[in-house]
Image (cartoon, coloured by chain):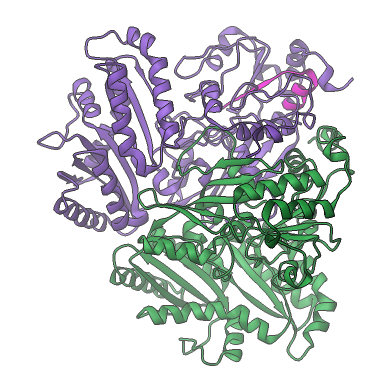
Chain colours: A green, B purple
Amino acid sequence: MTAADRPSDTRAFVAACGQALGAAHVLTDAHDTAPFLADWRRRYLGRACAVLLPADTREVAAVVRLAREYRVALVPQGGNTGLAGGATPDASGAQAVISLKRLNRIRDVDAHNNTITVEAGVVLAEIQARAQAEARLFALSLAAEGSCTIGGNLSTNAGGTGVLRYGNTRELCLGLEVVTPQGEIWDGLRALRKDNTGYDLRDLFIGAEGTLGIITAAVMKLHPAPVAKVTALAGLASPHAALDFLSMAQRHAGALLTGFELMSDFSLRLVGRHFPQMRYPFAHTHAQTVLLELSDSESEEHARALFERLMEEALEEGIVADAVVAENLSQSRAFWDLREHIPLAQAEEGLNIKQDISVPISSIGRFIEETDALIARAAPGARMVTFGHLGDGNLHYNVQSPEGVDPKRFLDEYQARINTLVYEQVHAHRGSISAEHGLGQLKVNEAMHYKSPVEVRLMQTIKAALDPDNLMNPGKVVPEARPSGLRPGTAPDHTEESAP
Amino acid sequence: MTAADRPSDTRAFVAACGQALGAAHVLTDAHDTAPFLADWRRRYLGRACAVLLPADTREVAAVVRLAREYRVALVPQGGNTGLAGGATPDASGAQAVISLKRLNRIRDVDAHNNTITVEAGVVLAEIQARAQAEARLFALSLAAEGSCTIGGNLSTNAGGTGVLRYGNTRELCLGLEVVTPQGEIWDGLRALRKDNTGYDLRDLFIGAEGTLGIITAAVMKLHPAPVAKVTALAGLASPHAALDFLSMAQRHAGALLTGFELMSDFSLRLVGRHFPQMRYPFAHTHAQTVLLELSDSESEEHARALFERLMEEALEEGIVADAVVAENLSQSRAFWDLREHIPLAQAEEGLNIKQDISVPISSIGRFIEETDALIARAAPGARMVTFGHLGDGNLHYNVQSPEGVDPKRFLDEYQARINTLVYEQVHAHRGSISAEHGLGQLKVNEAMHYKSPVEVRLMQTIKAALDPDNLMNPGKVVPEARPSGLRPGTAPDHTEESAP
């Protein structure tokens, strides 16, 4: 009898895991497992036959082999801060959560090579701190950095505020260690800038949300720590002006430009309403405000002088209406605080519809104009909270209920309609409906709806080839292709159907 | 009868291609096909039932469907400048070369988005020129840029001189259009900086040398064009000193540092011998010379001042023995000429053993010392021509016959031994035996020898899943896994054998 024919046996699996990991690291008590079974935003509540806490890569591999033997699906979990339910098990109680928390060692720092080798469960902020201690920068930075883990960052290809200059998590990774769905350990922990000796397995596992294997360790890139970071704010008339300003800033600053964030007037007014201690530095309001950041390897004075020249030209050309350069670190911090308080102000204002979309940067102006108009028509009075990483073409294009309307009722009535409207617009602009948060279980169907059948089949083919028993985080990222029991290679031939 | 059972029918295939492409675009005459059947270095000479020249993506897809119908293997080819025989067919005469030359349109330039959309057959230099016309930089640059094509660059994940700052071809690509082994067209031409809606198919096709499908077009990243490029030379005592100098230069210059090339004394002496008009700018020779390049978005003066400060500190700390900053563009050019004439001087000196290896940057000093000593013992008098992209950990660690010894005889006797010795050293330092040239047919066996069985099987599983009939550039990059006729999914279970 092959593994594929055996029925799932969760009870025997849990017992065998207890043997392999020690009883203390196999949680089954409801009180102990609860924190692992709901996602961070509490949108998803799952059940599990156990929560497993392996100590190291070998124990992860042992768990995967047992899962295969007893036909139990595994849901890998890091800091459990994901926004798409990718780390939450389904409601059946037949899946097991495998937490990577105990794989929390920094294995190596190589300052001359500008690399750090970390296990999947190391918290992002810890990597940043360790890099700093070596006069290096670990450039990944995002709101959850105090509790998210690098394994989760890799599995979702997390974005954040440093992407403009340093790229997504994908671009910061040189090598991986992965436990395959067969329970083998792939040691791809290369610390090389150049290696062309075969298929790029690394990037296949990055962003796969644990559906193709479990990332247990990684070699991440470090950068020389900048000597100074200086921020500035600029008030502008429109997203189009912000786009012209981005081009100008890139021409002036090149790779020194590490942040370029857009904040609509209403976004900042929300911050002002709920956090009155936050100060908007301009005398007049502007339709759009841009936050810029320079990371300089020379000096703060150099960065500030560069900003002055840029702002002068932008003011002269009428692209920018007003501008202020932070005079010190605490003012820089205050500017970032404005930006970071937008989601908090939204939460204070009440339930709202959140988007994480991207379009080509050149299309952002038109996208916002068109979509604003469509939403105004579809949901009169809806208040747009538009902000985000303009330099990456990535907007949090959120929608708040009309003033005085109960948010819950508004969402019940409009959320589905507005989502569809936004996704259709994103699709028309050849954008992405999940720019930096991944698909998890939240957006699989929507994402596949907008992908071509060719692309969906390529994904399904890879999933079926690497995880033929569909035990690695099933239901996440990619929809199942085939009736259960059918093996890869016997899928029907789709050539004719979509031949051009 | 399924396609897999049918015998290959090259005659019917060639006739059908004539129908599909027009007779003028199906070459079979020996005189016409000859340029496509030998690689650039003339190490490989193949045969082909035809050389096919489709006009566009739809014709490429039509050819792939015909290849499938008639069971004919396809060898995709771009500018035919590869160094590993990846684009040369085997000697059977049963394969067909599919040249992407006629897919040579620049489809779109989007300056605000910093992207350019190009077809696979566009010559690299043409993309650079078009970017420049838009005040942008296309950062891929390598010796063959006048004749290599972007499709080939992508399929081999080409490196070159800009990798330190801008990355390999992989890092310069945002989206792809690919004809799959089933003859379907995957439109993955996304122009987004952030997109997390599924598996990273793009990076799977990049570097796969046409074994998983045929890249027909791509969206490539542009950067703002720097205002000034300034180079400098520094004389140092050892690779270890060069490494300390690299850290210092990165600290001073951050992302402005776009080149850091190492040249050993003997490399430059060879240049002096065969190109006496080239001038070495230092009064005394140095064991190692480093060429640095800064790309500045402010001004030439700013770059030069930065260099002055760097060199002053490096001289003071005794890391650098002598230094000279180029005073103008033509002197900058002259410094690069020295570097670029090393391979030419090697050719003048006679046949030699070439390597394209990488190791972690921090290991370069030890790697050179140890390997030099081993080679001196194994092949007394052999002359090391060590140069390359130190900033990427990528060395062309070449070996010339001893003075006065016939190069041909030396190679016959020592090449295999020296290759093995170098590869073992690279492996011991966790490096790569093909850093920027790919595997093609030159290094498949060697590369697989040093990979773990887990990694080789992962590659084979992907190949078998995407190209079950093994018709896409068979024999390149990945060795065949299974007796022909066996379908994926029926491969034996390897779990136990290599379980940790």
Looking at the rendering, the stretch of residues picked out in magenta corresponds to: B64-77
- Which residue is rendered at x = 42% and y = 71% of the image? A314
Depth check: A312 or A161 in front?
A161
In the rendered image, is residue B439 in sight? no
In the rendered image, is residue A142 in sight? yes
Residue A210 sits above or below residue B290 on the image: below
Place of residue A122 in the rendered image (x, y in percent of width and height, measured from the top left): 54, 60
Place of residue B211 in the rendered image (x, y in percent of width and height, measured from the top left): 64, 29
Which image quarter holds the C terminus of chain B?
A: top right
Q: Is residue A366 left or right of residue B341?
A: right
Q: Is residue B107 left or right of residue A30?
A: left
Depth check: A356 or A1 in front?
A1
Depth check: A248 or B8 in front?
B8
User: Splitting the image into 4 quarters, where does residue B25 fall?
Assistant: top right
Q: In this view, does A455 lie to the left or right of A162?
A: right
User: Splitting the image into 4 quarters, where does residue A354 fall?
Assistant: bottom right
- Which residue is rendered at x = 52% and y = 70% of the image? A261
Q: In this view, does A41 lie to the left or right of A251?
A: right
Residue A317 sits above or below residue B234 on the image: below
Place of residue B346 in the rendered image (x, y in percent of width and height, measured from the top left): 30, 21
Q: How many labels does the image show?
A: 0
- Which residue is rendered at x = 54% and y = 70% of the image? A146
Residue A150 sits above or below residue B118 on the image: below
* Residue B67 covered by magenta stretch: yes
What is the residue that sits farthest to the left in this orientation?
B283
Which image quarter holds the N terminus of chain B?
A: top right
Place of residue A349 in the rendered image (x, y in percent of width and height, measured from the top left): 68, 86
* Residue A362 covered by magenta stretch: no
